Image (cartoon, rainbow, N blue to C red):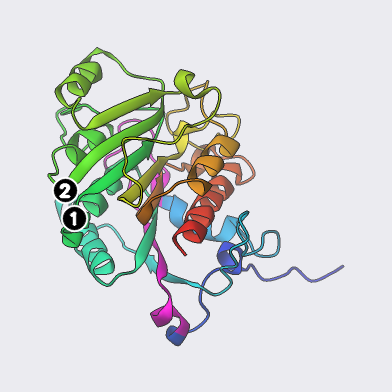
Amino acid sequence: MPEPKDIIPFAGCFAADDEARARARVVFIGLPDDSQSTYRRGCARAPERIRLAYDGNCYNASTETGVDLTGAVADLGDLASLDSWEATARRYREFAAGIYSSGKVPFFAGGDHAVTVPVVAALAALNEPVHVVQIDAHPDLYPVFDGNTHSHACAAARMLEMSHVASLTQLGVRTLNRPQSQQAVLHRDRLRIFSSRDLGGGIPAISHIPRGAKVFVNVDIDAFDPAYAPGVSHPVPGGLTPRQVLDFLQCADWTLVGMDVVEVNLTFDRNDQTAVLAARLLHEGMGYAA
């Protein structure tokens, strides 16, 4: 029988030595925290699985658009959770601010959706307006959920409180209820919501984001129909397809300053389907940034 091959993490995109890691403009960081999940835990284990499931024995380092990222990405490892969410969020924010200030482009693997809040807060280090594109089944606009203002169900509400966030665009939403609709009205000057029903013919260009503007892309993996992404805590039928989102990312006309993929729950994944999709989205985003 043939000997099993060693796994090649993240399709061979990761730099092999310290010198190459120091040169890399694109970096990968795991944020393994799901302490703010409201229903099912399991997202904290996702970053390492995203690395390993996207095995270079099966996938290669070139994006669909032909960008070869072999050895071009610095894997900075995982930032472990601390004793409290406040301490963890502060660690995430300070680390991300250092990455942005260095001119590198970070790609984060969560973790639940709460981890997005500190890395978007850290974008204030750029001293420029930033537009956030949130691809998600849920608007996450609760001002507070079950008494917790840090809940992953409050992620968008917290981002809209940040003065450097010029706009928040949500794509794929299909769970907008009355309390969140009320918040959407309050923030209608900076918030645009496109439901999954709106996007049946594909995701259009977002005209309110200026060409070349700085953009952070936030992907909650439950934006996708559960047929494509079963490994989530809150599956909602009727979602987006990978082709829709990949086309959207590849045809954008922005300056991508960062991206994350959150809410991959390994407990409910099948054959690494969701972990591989998360990796593929990050890979294509990295190619765009590079």
Q: Is residue 190 visible?
A: yes
Q: Which residue is more in the foreground, 89 or 34?
A: 89
Residue, x 31% and y 50% (percent of image)?
A: 213
List the residue tagged with mark 1: 128
Residue, x 27% and y 43% (percent of image)?
A: 114
Q: Answer with the quarter of the image where residue 161 lies.
A: top left
Residue 39: percent from left, percent from top: 35, 30
Q: Are marks 1 and 2 in contact (CB under 8 Å)?
A: yes
Q: Which residue is more in the foreground, 242 or 83?
A: 242
Q: Which residues are magenta?
A: 20-44
Residue 221: percent from left, percent from top: 46, 39
Distance between mark 1 and mark 2 Cα atoms: 7 Å
Q: Amino acid at mark 1?
A: Glu
List the residue tagged with mark 2: 164
In the displayed structure, would residue 63 be above or below residue 274?
Answer: below
Please tell me whether mark 2 sits on a helix, a strand or a loop.
Answer: loop
Q: Residues within 10 Å of mark 1 (few under 14, many from 20)?
A: few
Q: Amino acid at mark 2?
A: His
Q: Is residue 157 magenta?
A: no
Left or right: 262 with respect to 148? right
Left or right: 123 with respect to 9? left
Left or right: 236 with respect to 12? left
Q: Is residue 83 visible?
A: no
